[in-house]
Image (cartoon, rainbow, N blue to C red):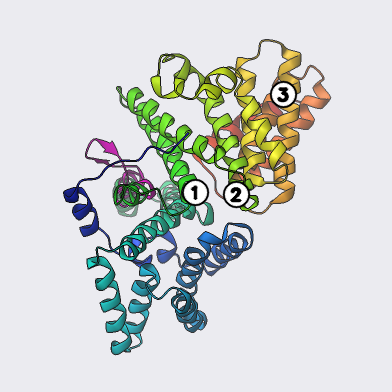
Amino acid sequence: MTEEVKQPTNNQSNMIEEQITPGLIGLNLNIMHALDMHMIEDAKHNIYKLIKNEHSVLINVHKNMVALFKMKIPRERREARLELEQILEKFPDHLNALADLEHIYRELHRFTDADYCRKTIEHNLDGKNRNSLQNKRICLLEQGYAILIERTLINERTVQLRITDLHKMLNTEYERSEGKRRECLERSLHHQMQVLRNVQNANEDEKVDGHILRKGSSLQKFQMADELSTNPLPHVVWIFYFAKALNQYYDSLENISKLKDGMEDEMIAVTLKAIKKFWYITQEPFRVDMKTFVARSYAYIGHILMKRKRLINSNSTIPELLEIPELKKKLLNDPLKASKKAYELMPNDVSVLNRFGRALWNCVDQTLSTKTKLQQLYQSEKILSASISKDGQRNWFAYSSRMVVRKDIANLERNDKIAEEYLQKAKSDGHICFKSKTTRKDMTILAEVCQKLAKFP
């Protein structure tokens, strides 16, 4: 199977090139507005883990992000400059490093060095040869990757959460107050609610050209890089993260579909694109350095087919899926095979374990036997626990998933003692979610767990 190649026109390529703005500083990443040193150190620690564990093709964007975080810490700003200069020693035309280094040089009043960076950037942006085109594509791909993974580094809803906390404090003062002070606080509460709603709206995806995309989103960057040339992307790793960005876009569509009708066709199209890209990776000739990404691709395919089975079944004549015989014969009827294949390839990979555990939980809705349901839930809990044992500090997806699994085990268990034990365990997972990267959905589930626990003597 070969990856589908688009044929961009000259006008399309020129329009894309005009929109390229090198540098990670200009992406308006959340970390650039963080004031909490602990948050910055956590994000930096996570990037060092990625440098150690991820593919070497991502080394430059990881180092660039480390430099970005170090710029936030006064005593480490010199190290930030050195990090970027080290990238340029090996890759003199690295556009993102050049742009960020230009910014640092201008702050240091090293205008000659800054002007050199600017001239090198403009030379590459104006260039039409193969190397210039490759540099522009890598620039976009690294920007897309940086936006994509930032969600796992820090909480993108920090501002919203802080405003919410302030609202609670104001509300407490309002309840205690009387007279004019109470009236002033009432007006403050009203205006603050407006601020909170605006921040929530800003965090939601906006509609651009018929597609619901955040301006400057990771998917937008990957699409621009893909459309810039008829050649395949520089490395298969970028195709994997392109597929992840598509998968993330589906989540945005799913949220909006609850408020707006007519999203199903686009949800199907995005699902197919993501599956095809993940499948393309699994069909690449075997290479040891790509084994992790092949396993993760199988894990995502299994999770997508299991989670969206109703959506796919309701459109069983989709020609794109039918073009892949193995998907039609094996995986569509039993999506768990893909997850098991991923687990066989990489039984110790956190991403594989998380997707396999979640896919097992999704199986429960399609199982009639209570005994089988419990077996699937216990296996899911075991897999997710293994994931947390590998990475227990920032593995929010695993904690959130395990909380739901343990709650469902308690619901199905006839033994009250075991049921209470699993509710306590679910409460513990929920407490960890509450202290870290929480969501409204997680808090709703945690509230349900606490309500059920209250019924026990």
Amino acid, disc 1 = Val
Q: Residue at x 40, y 49 (%)?
A: 174
In front: 365, or 411?
Answer: 365
Asked which secondary structure carries label 1, the reply is: helix
Amino acid, disc 2 = Met
| Residue to which mark 2 is pinned | 290
Q: Residue at x 82, y 19 (%)?
A: 415
Rendered view: 59 above or below 168: below
Residue segment shown in magenta: 195-219
Q: Residue at x 19, y 53 (%)?
A: 15
**What's the distance in space between the residues labelled 1 and 3, CA to CA?**
33 Å
Does the CB distance between marks 2 and 1 fall below 8 Å? yes
Q: Residue at x 29, y 83 (%)?
A: 116
Residue 376 numbered mark, or none: 3
| Residue to which mark 1 is pinned | 236
Mark 2 surroundings: few (<14), some (14-19) or many (≥20) residues within 10 A:
some
